[in-house]
Image (spheres, grey):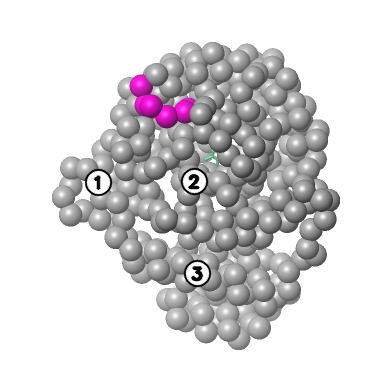
Amino acid sequence: MIKIGAKVFNTKVFLAPLSGCSDLSFRLICREHGAQMAFFEMLSSDALIRDSAKTFGMLKSATADAPIAGQLLGSVPEIMLEAALIMEERASVEFIDVNAACPVRKVVVNGSGAALFNTPEKLFAIIKILARKSGLPVTVKLRTGFDEPDIKKLVEIARGCEDAGVSAIFLHGRTRAQLYSGGVDYDAIKKVKENVNVPVFGSGDILSPALAKKMLDDTGCDGIIVARGAMGNPWLFKDINDFLKDGFCQPSRDKKYRLDVLKKHISYIKKYSELPPRTPRRIPGASETHSVKSSIGLMRKAALWYLKGFALAASARGKVTSAQNYEELLKILDKLV
Ligand SMILES: Cc1cc2nc3c(=O)[nH]c(=O)nc-3n(C[C@H](O)[C@H](O)[C@H](O)COP(=O)(O)O)c2cc1C
């Protein structure tokens, strides 16, 4: 059991926020395989307050898609607050996470995401205003440094975030410069855990039940967030939960099982791309569904995740990447069994 503010979670294994990946269909597939808690994709606070239909489209959810948290990107406290209030009004989020970890260049040059490591006072101001005025618990996602790991500064920032009012810290054990590769700095996560009183979640290379346990054991962190490990492998949640419970989990799934889950995943993409999304506030009737073109893009992407571990002829992979619609993709997959 983990408490974030007054909210109680009966799991320590969350699905991470994943831009462009953790949409409703992916979250539902993960939840069906043991993920009890997830995040919406990261939302730009500027886009939310500008009523971007595309951004509002990312707040699509379903009854089974709960509990859920929101994550905001931005650097201006007042804009972040306005965005948080919109998110709170439009989606039943358990807490709001401030993204101080995104390494993407166009984000960082605007002073948002991982750049907030270099401007801690700005980060604290964002957290303070959200914690005082949003009415929801506020959390933060950090990295271990900007160019280089800087554990001393990281610990100061983590403590400052706690003083500013965060109810939990999510920590990706890599620097901004590392992006998503290179070793995970377990020691940095351990140091942060030892120096704050709020729950700390470790992130980085949670790719197997053994690596999930390693993160928990080596750092003493309270929980973990699963990211790339779940792509094409959503049953990783069940495997981690089983392994943490009794040191045992099911051996790898066979081809038919994987294909069946993939087919269900793409059927969700089809179903939810056709569903009307939450509409922006000031544009009556405006709506954003994935166009047929973009939903086939999502389906192909998902298919390639699942097929990664398959011994497949290059021609079969090529057919998947050139499928033009759901029905065509399904026919190609049916021939793979
Ligand atoms: C495609 C992709 C999108 C991501 N999007 C976000 C995001 O929107 N917000 C965030 O805090 N982290 C994001 N992350 C980082 C993950 O949440 C996670 O911290 C990171 O991938 C490390 O975990 P892993 O090594 O287990 O993948 C993203 C990672 C990937 C690969």
Q: Secondary structure at mark 3?
A: helix
- Where the C terminus falls, by quadrant? bottom right
What residue would you read off at disc 3?
266
| Rendering quarter of residue 195 | top right
On residue 280, which mark appears? 1
Identify residue type, mark 2: Pro
**Residue at (58% x, 39% y) in the render:** 9
The answer to whether the residue labelled 2 contacts the one labelled 3, judged by CB atoms less than 8 Å apart, is no
| Rendering quarter of residue 118 | top right
Q: Secondary structure at mark 2?
A: loop
What residue would you read off at disc 2?
67
The answer to whether the residue labelled 1 contacts the one labelled 3, judged by CB atoms less than 8 Å apart, is no
Q: Which residues are magenta?
A: 133-140
Q: Position of residue 154 (x, y in %)?
A: 64, 20
Q: CA distance from mark 2 to mark 3?
A: 23 Å
* The residue positioned farthest toward the left in the image shown: 284
Label 2 or label 3, whichever lies nearer to me, is 2
Mark 2 surroundings: few (<14), some (14-19) or many (≥20) residues within 10 A: some
Along the horizontal axis of the image, is 160 left or right of 241? left
